[in-house]
Amino acid sequence: MASSWRRHGHYEYRVVTIDRDVSVPDARRMLTEEAEYGRWELARTRLYVGGHRKVWLRRKVIRAASTL
């Protein structure tokens, strides 16, 4: 599994590449854990000819205001 991070506007994105050897239930379990513990939501999925999947996850960027 590989991943990369990007920020765009009010959301930050994480692109996760899932190998074709990973079963659907295992991929679902992995993405469910990311959603629960990392507060990610599913933005987009792609299934490629070779069988690998690319999943875009996103979450809102929380900007802390300075209190000083």
Image: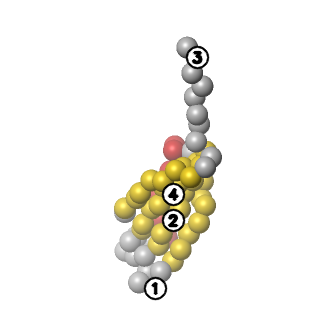
Judge depth for marks 1 and 3 and give the one in front. 3
Residue kind at label 2, given as amino acid type: Val
Q: Give the distance between the C-alpha atoms of the residues marked 2 and 4, in whole angstroms.
A: 9 Å
Q: Give the distance between the C-alpha atoms of the residues marked 2 and 1, in whole angstroms.
A: 15 Å
Which type of secondary structure does the marked residue at label 3 adopt? Answer: loop
The residue that label 4 is drawn on is 31
Residue kind at label 1, given as amino acid type: Val
Q: Earlier in the sequence, mark 1 or mark 4?
A: 4
Judge depth for marks 2 and 3 and give the one in front. 3
User: Is residue 62 found left or right of 23 in the rendered image?
Assistant: right
Specify the quadrant of the image occupied by residue 51: bottom left
Instruction: Tell whether label 4 touches label 2 (CB within 8 Å).
Output: yes
The residue that label 3 is drawn on is 67
Q: Earlier in the sequence, mark 2 or mark 3?
A: 2
- Residue 43 visible to the viewer: yes
The residue that label 1 is drawn on is 49
